[in-house]
Image (cartoon, rainbow, N blue to C red):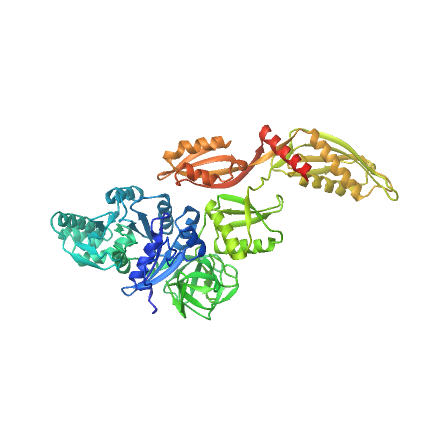
Amino acid sequence: MKSHPANELRNFAVVGHAASGKTVLCDAMLFNCGAINRIGSIADGTTTSDYHPIEKERGNSVHATPLHAEWKDRKLNLIDTPGYLDFNPEALGCMIACDFAMIVVSAHDGVQVGADIVWDFATRFGIPKLIVLNHMDYEEADFELVVEEIREHFGERVFPITIPQNPGPGFNQVLDVVERQLITYATDGSGKSTAAEPEGDLKRLSDEQHARFIECVAESDESLIEKFFDQGGLSDDEMHSGMHRGFQEQSYIPLYVTSATNNIGVTAVLDFVARFGSSPIDRKTVAGKDADGADIEVSIDDDEPSALVFKMIHEDQVGELSLFRVYSGRIKSGDELKNAATGHSERIGQMCLLNGRNRESVDSLGAGDIGAVVKLKHTHTGNSLCSPARVVRLPEVEYPKPNIHSAIRSRSRGDEDKVAEGLAMLHEEDPTFLHHVDSELRQTVISGQGELHMQVVCDQLKRRFNVEIDLVEPRIPYRETIRSSGESRYRHKKQSGGAGQFAEVWMRIEPAERDTGIEFKESLVGQNVDRVFVPSVEKGVQAACAEGILAGYRVVDVKIVFYDGKMHPVDSKDVAFQIAGKHAFQEAFQQARPLLLEPIYEIAVRIPEAFMGNVMGDISGRRGKILGMDTEGKLQTLRAHVPQRELFHYSTVLRSLTGGRGLHEENFSHYEEMPHDIAAKVIAAHKQMGQAD
């Protein structure tokens, strides 16, 4: 492929809800551009984008896939993104490298939550949106009804450029209101079409919509507004000259109708993208940070190279690939660049353009272009690569926090190292997947965006690393503390021949303020106990606190005073006072009305108002306490405190309650006393486990 200047590049993400037809639409675009020789099928597993085994098996996209093609002297860098909510962050991570978003909506299913989410993503990055209304060949495809729904969600500026004339099975004809032509597509999937002048009622509709469109375009430019009022309209040339700016300003949001499976209407979308779509020069500068953290601007005209690595992918043949966008200068194979985040030097190896599993080698990529390089040693998703002569950090994506957590259990002993390696690599490729080893609870906990996300992680571990794991409910880090004071005098005496052990510890304890931890003091008077044994007693107390007394959980918020005791001139030693200190504390603790504390999380739930009652009722059933509500556009954000015990797989329940439209975030807030009946069950379970051991 020839090298293209920045003004000839079109970088866009194909986004939308699951099953709206994004992947087949991408295939249809590649086919029309001559990049592939046939349009693939999801059912047959033959699409260009969904080439990973897991995607073929499940019949849906899991990874964002970069593609490229040429159309009318323009290079298209398009990225097919997953639509399932669990993998929505893939679209977020890729949109930072794109200049506009192509949002696909199904004419059969209408606007679903995935479309709302990616619309918000595009708005966050400040990039224009183009809407493709796909599946116009489906039974009961209602154009007017869906367009009304789209406008309710995304505003009145949504303007249908093409209007279907025979929606439903057999769909192959559209009215192009910009060019005022009736376009009939071949039904053989070739994408070829013929144009004719509309007549009668169709001509009146064409003229009416054309005039409305001219008004939308004129609103984007003051000079066009003046001409519009002076001339009573705009000429076709004037309209065309303003369409690019109008798209950038979103004075109109173009909507095209298609049947991607039958290759109907797709070439019209390509024509708009090539002629009026955003190019990198429309986002000529991007805000960054220099080596000292000061704000700077990176311009596409800068000579020094800079690039952002926006995604990592795994290829069986070559291993890891780093996907990047060049923001300035030109990057060539063999260049030595600096990772602005880590300070490491990286040598750029083999670079390529991707079309699914197919790779096309390139020697260099200029500003605005997108490509891949064989895995870099010290560079991760979100890192910036730049010339050592000008260090810049480009903006990074802030990914949503995981909202579902599971502990893992390996099915085979000895797989721990392989599991750890696999988890680390999967996180490298997907920053929204997190994992950590909880030393307190002795579990490895993985976190993701939903149940499907977690299932895919398990599948990947089995397929790529040959390890099998089970997902189990994570243990809860309860805490133990006391309500009142307690006192103990404990004597440890051991004599079994030879040197013995002797220590006596007198101890008082009382509750401390919440979140103050353990406070240990000594108030010894006289010579009953040598002060050298104070640290020994404290070690014993700390050991008891770490092990727990009621149910095996850490003891917190207790004040301890070691105030007296006894010792033996020969048999008293460090280990004896450790043992005595531990048991003295345990006895005093049991006298002080012990209790369990449970972790409380603050959750923020974003839902349409219609689901508020169901969600509030569910939170109350989880022992939750409503903190308040805020309005964000058409959504309500409900804030509540909920015990961690009640949040296992809450995201799945929330989606069920809200038809997939509810999202939530959760953050640890504080500990508070656990209800007696629930605490009794936790304590009983601990005792039963101890008896089993």
Give the percent coordinates (x, y) of residue 323. 43, 60
The percent coordinates of residue 673 (x first, y second) are 58, 31
Q: Is residue 543 visible?
A: yes
Frontmost residue, 405 versus 594: 405
Left or right, 414 with respect to 79, comes to right
Q: Quadrant of the C terminus?
A: top right
**Residue visible at 79% across and 44% down in the picture:** 574
Q: Is residue 450 visible?
A: no
Query: How many numbered circles does the render carry?
Result: 0
**Residue 2 on image: x %, y %:** 34, 69
Q: Quadrant of residue 524?
A: top right
Q: Please identify the residue farthest to the front as the structure is shown.
A: 44
Residue 406's place in the image compared with 358, above or below, is above
Residue nearer the viewer, 260 or 328: 260
| Residue at x 26%, y 46% (from the top left corner) | 157
Q: What quarter of the picture does the N terminus occupy?
A: bottom left
Q: Residue furthest left?
A: 200
Residue 147 falls in image quadrant: top left
Q: Is residue 333 above or below residue 468?
A: below
- Relative height, residue 391 to residue 606 (above, below): below
Between 373 and 453, which is closer to the camera in this rendering? 453
Rendered location of residue 184, percent (x, y): 19, 55
Residue 440 vs residue 194, the one in the foreground: 194
Instruction: Identify whether 227 is placed above or below 364.
Output: above
Left or right of 439? Residue 136 is left
